Image (cartoon, rainbow, N blue to C red):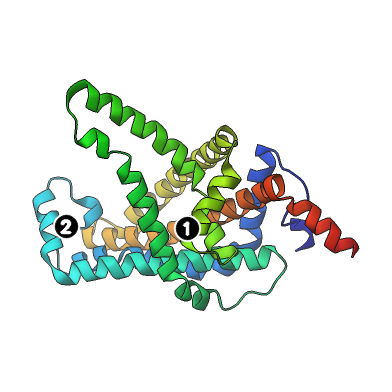
């Protein structure tokens, strides 16, 4: 793992942050693939239940929206959706923690137990972020006409800044075992002054992911059509399996990117590079 050079000992350029993300991904993807697949599968619990009950799946409700909305009256569906969201959060946290352990030269193990222990903090963090972002639109909701349009535009602009400002909060919460509020305030401090740089990193990463999704999604669709051989049920089942596989391959990149961004910000704002040099010479 010495060739990975994580955490970095100096400030990185935008290209170097992305390169570090890919190096973390390549070094860890094989060892987090199962956790990532379980996380993607957990997010599909509602769709699996809908398929068993021969109902329209939630992602394919076009033309059958009332039937899709009616599913939320089913307590089993609601329970599965909530459980699925929690399990998805747990497995994603486990993926990120394992990537961090491996990248830092440590040994993997115990990440799921740690993620379960931190799930209440993760949920609290999501609630705080969601409530804060929703509050941005309250002024627009209580006004009308041109004022509403202006306030809505202002809320969207502030939302873009806020998204970048809190983008490291979950990683801090997991990697540094911080509380939800501490994670938010520290993320805000670390990202302060770096909005356009971080926006550039996230934009390039998003473009790469979109291209990857399109390419792999096309391959998955072709495989589903060929192997399904005109059987709609078989095609649907194969498509779902391939979607889980695709999600499992892509999910670790989110964690790798989050770790690379946070490590670079720590060097820039907290002198993590100086601490490493001092400890190395001690």
Q: Residue at x 46, y 37 (%)?
A: 161
- How packed mark 2 is, by other alpha carbons closer than 10 Å (few <14, some 14-19, many 20 or more), is some
Label 2 residue SS: loop
Residue 204 lies in quadrant: top right
Percent x, y of residue 114? 52, 75
Q: Nearer the viewer, residue 28 or 54?
A: 28
Quadrant for the C terminus, please: bottom right
In the rendered image, which residue does mark 1 sit on? 181
Give above or below for 166 relative to 207: below
* Residue 141 can be seen in this image: yes
Cα distance between the residues tagged 2 and 1:
39 Å
Residue 116 lies in quadrant: bottom left
Quadrant for the N terminus, please: bottom right
Q: Residue at x 52, y 58 (%)?
A: 182
Q: Nearer the viewer, residue 86 or 272?
A: 272
Q: Residue at x 29, y 31 (%)?
A: 152
Q: Earlier in the sequence, mark 2 or mark 1?
A: 2
Label 1 residue SS: helix
Percent x, y of residue 42? 35, 68
In the rendered image, which residue does mark 2 sit on? 56
Q: Nearer the viewer, residue 31 or 137?
A: 137
Give above or below for 141 relative to 144: below
Q: Is residue 151 left or right of residue 211?
A: left
């Amino acid at each position: 793992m010495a060739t990975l050079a994580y955490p970095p000992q100096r400030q990185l350029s935008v290209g170097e942050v992305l390169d570090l993300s890919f190096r973390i991904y390549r070094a860890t993807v094989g060892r987090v693939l199962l956790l990532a697949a379980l996380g993607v599968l957990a997010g599909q619990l509602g769709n699996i239940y809908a398929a068993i009950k021969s109902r329209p799946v939630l992602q394919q409700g076009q033309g059958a929206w009332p039937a899709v909305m009616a599913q939320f009256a089913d307590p089993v569906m609601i329970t599965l959706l909530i459980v699925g969201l929690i399990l998805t959060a747990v497995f994603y946290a486990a993926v990120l923690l394992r990537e961090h352990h491996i990248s830092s030269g440590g040994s993997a193990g115990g990440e799921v137990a740690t993620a379960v222990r931190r799930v209440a903090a993760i949920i609290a963090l999501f609630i705080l972020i969601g409530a804060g972002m929703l509050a941005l639109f309250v002024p627009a909701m209580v006004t009308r006409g041109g004022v509403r349009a202006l306030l809505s535009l202002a809320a969207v602009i502030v939302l873009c800044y806020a998204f970048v400002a809190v983008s490291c909060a979950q990683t801090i919460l997991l990697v540094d075992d911080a509380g939800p509020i501490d994670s938010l305030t520290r993320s805000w401090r670390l990202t302060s002054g770096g909005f356009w740089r971080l926006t550039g990193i996230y934009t390039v990463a998003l473009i790469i992911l979109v291209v990857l999704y399109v390419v792999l999604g096309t391959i998955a669709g072709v495989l589903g059509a060929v192997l399904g051989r005109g059987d709609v049920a078989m095609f649907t089942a194969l498509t779902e399996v391939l979607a889980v596989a695709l999600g499992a391959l892509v999910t670790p990149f989110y964690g790798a990117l989050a770790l690379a961004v946070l490590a670079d910000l720590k060097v820039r704002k907290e002198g993590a590079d100086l601490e490493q040099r001092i400890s190395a010479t001690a």
